[in-house]
Image: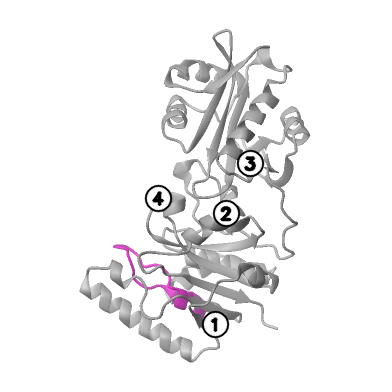
Amino acid sequence: MNTFFRLAVLEDLPALLQLEEQCFTTDRLNSRSFQWMITRAHGKLLVAQYDEQLMGYAVVLFHRGTSLARLYSIAIAAQARGTGLGKQLLDRIEACALEHDCAYLRLEVRLDNPAAIALYERNGYRRFALIHDYYQDHADALRLEKRILQHRESRSIQVPYYPQTTEFTCGPACLLMAMGALQRNRLLERREELQIWREATTVFMTSGHGGCSPQGLALAAARRGFRVRLQLSMTGPLFLDGVRNEHKKDVMRLVHEEFTAQLIASAVEREVGGPLNLPQLLENGGQPLVLISSYRLTRSKSPHWVIVTDCDEEFVYLHDPDVDHSQHRQPMDCQHVPVSHGEFEKMCSFGRDKLRAAVILFAQP
């Protein structure tokens, strides 16, 4: 079959919807979803055309600011099955991922679809998760991934994933993950997420609820029996220059002064201005929480906490507690997200002052 591959255009909508109707009984993409994929998504929708007829399509989405891609959907017309078209589309999606400097391509597939699973596994995809009750009809999904660039085996310490349950608890969610990595049987509960926020919150760059400061998170971790290192590029209240309201500035100063007094009386190790040596910290069993600018991930300029799960010569791997459903993301899309070292350096240097902040947890000896 002499098939032509190209990017989808809006004129393809009727044919795409017909393919969707033919290939799937549940979880179908609708016209609005296809329009978003074609015109606004951070990704590509490829179609396979033969004699003016669409024989298949595939959608790949890119995780902004990272080296992760996701095969969101793939469909092959009934008359084109068994011709190798699925592999051809998959190969082109992988090429798109490489063009966007992606290291991983991830996907979900129904557990009761052995033909599709076999196609992916023949092409180098490995199973790494089973998601129960994933589809609309309650069917389970296999989660598969393919590493386009090779890297070493992962760390012996496995970091559990916990998504933040509010827009302002990224720091507590990361702290829960770090504690869960160092204490395998520790429960990650929303009650403690909110309690940590109450202990660690301050007020900066927000008109709503405050976020958690590095000092507050360090103190919260120390209270829970962990050895803690706090690394900052500056002393004094953080993000003060980004706030115009004098009353809010006074609150920030007072909170900072109280945190500083508590830190002096605590066993928290403090370092100002030193480099964040991730390979050494991870090798020594540390679990780093890093404050980043979320702009490179979501185009929002707010400060945001992530946790580093691993790093190698090419990438730093992150758990991002913020699951952005508006970008068709699932929690699995936010785990072990590969970010190039150059991109990570840009992320964790915040604002005009180039603020850097990290809280590193260690198990007590």
Residue 104: horizontal and vertical position, in percent?
64, 45
Other residues around mark 3 within 10 Å, as few (<14) / some (14–19) / many (≥20): many
Instruction: Kindly indicate the quadrant of the structure image that contains residue 93.
Output: top right
**Observer able to see residue 320:** no
* Stretch in magenta: 200-220
Residue type, numbered disc 2 = Ser
**Do the CB atoms of the residues marked 1 and 3 lie less than 8 Å apart?**
no
Could you tell me how far apart the alpha carbons at marks 1 and 3 are, in whole angstroms? 40 Å
Question: Where 25 falls versus 98 (above or below)?
Answer: above
Query: Residue 365 falls in which quadrant of the image?
Result: bottom right
Q: Residue at x 32, y 82 (%)?
A: 254
4 and 3 marks in contact (CB < 8 Å): no
User: Marks 2 and 4, how far apart in space?
Assistant: 18 Å
Whichever of callouts 4 and 3 sits on the residue coming sooner in the sequence is 3
Cα gap from disc 4 to disc 3, whole angstroms: 22 Å
Asked whether residue 205 is drawn in magenta, I would say yes
Which residue type does callout 3 highlight?
Answer: Leu
Mark 3 and mark 2 lie on one chain; the one further toward the N terminus is 3
Q: x, y percentage for residue 152?
A: 74, 56
Labels 2 and 4: the sequence-earlier one: 4
User: Is 94 rendered above or below residue 17?
Assistant: below
Q: Which residue is mark 1?
A: 223
Q: Position of residue 163 (x, y in %)?
A: 53, 57
Residue 51: x percent and y percent?
58, 7
Residue marked by disc 3: 105
Name the main secondary structure of what is drawn in magenta: loop
Q: Which label sits on residue 340? A: 2
Amino acid type, callout 1: Arg
Extreme bottom residue here?
265
